Image (cartoon, rainbow, N blue to C red):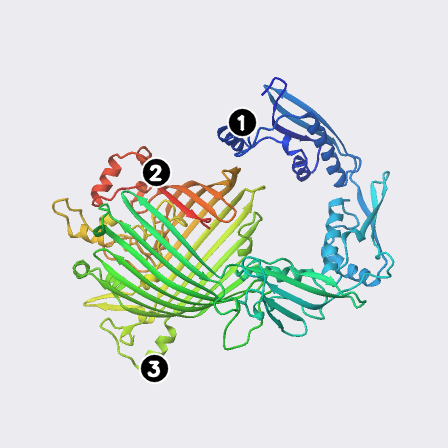
């Protein structure tokens, strides 16, 4: 900086009695005279060259002209809040090239409203105003005089008029006169609504005809399919790809109805939500030249390309292991000319062991599926178009999944379902899956099967090696999902219920179908699962001002097998059956317990080293070593889950290489548990006195790169409390902080006890989108 320059580092507001107004007054200081965000300023120093403002925020230098401008703006602000005699003075203090701006206010008396009158020439408009005013008005006798409240009232009544047919009504028709008595500090207000020039009343308009045109995906026209659908709609399709109903079902303005600006906006929103059009402007209205006060409307639409293909890829690396995840999504956006969307998905995940060649595949997961999504409710019964709060959908889904774990199991699943989702209100949405039919088949490696039997681990054989049917119904309720990207104060709730096997149980008991060797009823030669599963996600979002937010989340769930999945007999052992493999809960990963890899936490105080017995050596591995390797990523499951998260989110930089850079600090706590005790693994079952000892904890921080169309997330998390250990040894971060990035006695002992597995305090997570 030059000798006559100073950096603005502080703003002080004095003499404002209302704390909220004092905080708000700072916003009336010119942005170039407000203190820099320290981090933004450092990014500017670090990345910006030659004064270019590409990254971060340029330093805000003192400018006396802008200080004077800010003083007048604060003065006007206080006057608008009822302090009509308010005066503001400014003082500048500079020390070591750092400037403090001090704005001192003398408020004077607070002016209040004595009486409110209206002068509305049109009787129908006056009646509409008097009926609706109690609902929206912030201006009341005895209240503080506030010009912002007057502006709010004007905007609210303008919207009332636009919802009731007054197409030609403008805000300029609404004016206020304020008679001020400075001695008594009171204000008399009169609201005036004038008639249009030369008219005795404001005209009310009704909808007449509607023209719908659909261009080609490149915006061009040509020869069109033209159809007069009915007395209102004329349909012109240059793309030759859409049936008239596709658009007409979501035009909410019908012939003869009053013009309604909300229905105009609703039409645009719903047509956009169909996800088949790239340009849906608001319907355009033209007045008929006669005196009937009717409106013709026109909707011009440009569709998206009918077909698209998207490829996704991830590379995973942790502790010497690596793998990849490849995905492909093919989309046909208009399969039957009625906005039905076909999505064909392919996903292939492979995790290699340290060898890295083909024989070194540790596990892989292949999923192939297709979804056919209709933008309406399709059922044998008639349902109205439920489009007021969102486009309803009917989804027909089919998926094939192959899961392979080296040396253990090959498991295939075939899943088919029908799902309906619709919005009850803007805040409440429902998802109903009345039909969900799944067929799962597991083939266990013979050597692994023998090892499992020798260790009496029949539960794992049942979990991963059984062929089973699942017939289920599911329901999900969401509240306030539409607010998840906002910074307001609200609560979010998602609750899911999944019930399976009851209809099958009734039929097989009536038909007396045979039982298998484990005592379960069968259908077509195979048993079926019977269970009930409840899952909830409750969050509290609290705004801390600006783009700062504190979120608390608790995510509990429980699955209970019963009936045909309850009591199973293995030789002389009775095992209380568990959930189907795909229905169990797992902990760890980028969205819950972020310091643990997926499927590596719990259940309870499960300790793999103790469960599989003393480790062998490199030359003479024990049976426990072999089984430990085979069951890796599969032996840590549970029927109960309780996970909670606390996260503070804040903005760091407005412009960081084209993205908004945000930060996060978080803490996670929770685990999964088994419903029943497990032989050889103490304290894995859920008990009240085992909740706290079995609760894992981690802390961490992260960066979110907001690119508008998606958010790229990077988190680093550290284990604080690890429940696989006992007593005070669970507090691993405090007890072994010196081994955070180095290997010491604790890590070496863990590696010996766990047959070469390393202990990691820190976990890095990369992801797309927010964790919750």
Residue 563 in the image, given as x and y percentages of width and height: 33, 71
In this rendering, position of residue 15 left or right of residue 554 = right
Residue farthest toward the bottom in the current orientation of the protein? 511
Q: Would you identify the image quadrant in which residue 212 lies?
A: bottom right
Depth check, mark 2 against mark 1: the one in front is 1
In this rendering, position of residue 616 left or right of residue 177 = left
Residue 389 appears in view: no
Q: Would you identify the image quadrant in which residue 619 lies?
A: top left
| Secondary structure at numbered mark 3 | helix
Q: Which residue is mark 3?
A: 510
Compare residues 217 and 80 and report the one nearer the observer: 217
Q: Which residue is mark 1?
A: 50
The residue depicted at 49 percent of the width and 31 percent of the height is 47
Number of residues whose C-alpha sits closer than 10 Å to that of mark 3, classed few (under 14), some (14–19) or many (20 or more) = few
Residue 733 - label = 2
In this rendering, position of residue 172 left or right of residue 604 = right
Sequence-first tag of 2 and 3: 3
The residue depicted at 85 percent of the width and 38 percent of the height is 182
Sequence-first tag of 3 and 1: 1
């Amino acid at each position: 900086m030059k000798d006559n320059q100073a950096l603005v580092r502080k703003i002080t507001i004095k003499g404002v009695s209302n704390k909220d107004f004092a905080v708000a007054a700072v916003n009336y200081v010119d942005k170039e005279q407000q203190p820099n965000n320290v981090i933004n300023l450092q990014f500017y120093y670090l990345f910006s060259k030659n004064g270019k403002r590409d990254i971060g925020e340029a330093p805000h230098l003192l400018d006396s002209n802008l200080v004077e401008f800010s003083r007048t703006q604060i003065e006007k602000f206080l006057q608008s809040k009822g302090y009509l005699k308010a005066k503001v003075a400014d003082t500048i203090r500079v020390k070591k090239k750092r400037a403090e701006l001090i704005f001192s206010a003398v408020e004077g008396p607070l002016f209040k409203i004595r009486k409110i009158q209206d002068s509305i020439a049109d009787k129908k408009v006056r009646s509409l105003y008097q009926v609706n005013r109690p609902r929206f008005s912030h201006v009341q006798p005895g209240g503080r005089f506030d010009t912002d409240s007057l502006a709010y009232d004007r905007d609210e009544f303008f919207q009332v008029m636009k919802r009731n047919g007054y197409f030609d009504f403008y805000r300029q028709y609404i004016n206020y006169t304020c008679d001020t008595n400075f001695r008594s500090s009171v204000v008399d207000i009169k609201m005036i609504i004038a008639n249009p020039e030369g008219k005795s009343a404001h005209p009310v308009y009704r909808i007449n005809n509607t023209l719908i045109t659909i261009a080609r995906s490149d915006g061009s026209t040509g020869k069109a399919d033209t159809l007069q659908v009915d007395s209102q709609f004329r349909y012109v399709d240059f793309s030759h790809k859409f049936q008239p109903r596709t658009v007409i079902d979501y035009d909410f303005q019908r012939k003869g109805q009053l013009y309604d600006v909300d229905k105009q906006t609703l039409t645009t929103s719903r047509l956009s939500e169909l996800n088949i059009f790239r340009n849906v402007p608001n319907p355009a209205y033209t007045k008929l030249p006669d005196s009937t006060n009717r409106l013709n409307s026109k909707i011009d639409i440009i569709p998206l390309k009918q077909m698209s293909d998207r490829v996704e890829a991830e590379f995973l690396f942790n502790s010497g292991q690596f793998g990849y995840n490849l995905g492909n999504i093919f989309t046909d956006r208009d399969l039957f000319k009625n906005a039905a969307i076909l999505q064909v998905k392919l996903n292939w995940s492979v995790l290699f062991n340290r060898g890295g060649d083909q024989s070194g595949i540790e596990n892989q997961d292949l999923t192939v599926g297709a979804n056919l999504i209709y933008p309406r409710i399709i059922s044998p019964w008639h349902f109205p178009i439920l489009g007021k709060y969102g486009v309803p959908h009917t989804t027909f889904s089919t998926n094939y999944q192959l899961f392979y774990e080296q040396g253990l199991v090959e498991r295939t699943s075939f899943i088919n379902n029908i799902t309906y989702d619709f919005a009850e209100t803007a805040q409440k949405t429902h998802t109903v899956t009345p039909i969900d039919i799944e067929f799962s088949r597991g083939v266990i490696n013979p050597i692994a099967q023998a090892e499992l039997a020798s260790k009496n681990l029949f539960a794992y054989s049942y979990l991963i090696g059984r062929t089973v049917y699942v017939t289920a119904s599911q329901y999900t309720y969401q509240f306030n999902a539409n607010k998840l990207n906002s910074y307001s104060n609200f609560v979010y709730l998602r609750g899911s219920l999944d019930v399976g096997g009851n209809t099958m149980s009734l039929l097989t008991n009536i038909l007396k179908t045979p039982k298998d060797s484990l005592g379960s009823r069968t259908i077509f030669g195979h048993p079926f699962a019977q269970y009930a599963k409840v899952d909830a996600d409750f969050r509290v979002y609290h705004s801390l001002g600006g783009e700062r937010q504190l979120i608390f989340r608790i995510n509990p769930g429980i699955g209970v097998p019963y009936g045909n999945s309850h009591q199973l007999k293995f030789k002389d052992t009775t095992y209380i059956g568990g959930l189907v493999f795909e229905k169990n809960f797992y902990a760890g990963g980028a969205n819950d317990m972020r310091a643990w890899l997926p499927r590596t936490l719990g259940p309870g105080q499960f300790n793999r080293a103790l469960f599989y017995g003393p480790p062998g050596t490199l030359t003479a591995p024990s049976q426990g070593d072999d089984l430990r390797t085979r069951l890796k990523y599969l032996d840590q499951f549970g029927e109960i889950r309780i996970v909670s998260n606390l996260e503070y989110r804040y903005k760091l930089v407005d412009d960081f290489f084209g993205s908004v850079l945000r930060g996060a600090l978080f803490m996670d706590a929770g685990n999964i548990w088994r419903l029943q005790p497990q032989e050889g693994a103490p304290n894995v079952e859920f008990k009240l006195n085992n909740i706290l000892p079995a609760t894992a904890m981690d802390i961490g921080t992260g960066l979110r790169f907001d690119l508008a169309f998606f958010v790229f997330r990077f988190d680093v998390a550290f284990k604080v409390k690890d429940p696989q250990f006992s007593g005070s040894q669970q507090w691993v971060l405090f007890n072994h902080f010196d081994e955070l990035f180095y290997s010491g006695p604790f890590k070496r002992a863990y590696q010996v006890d766990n047959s070469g597995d390393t202990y990691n305090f820190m976990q890095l997570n990369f992801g797309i989108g927010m964790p919750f």
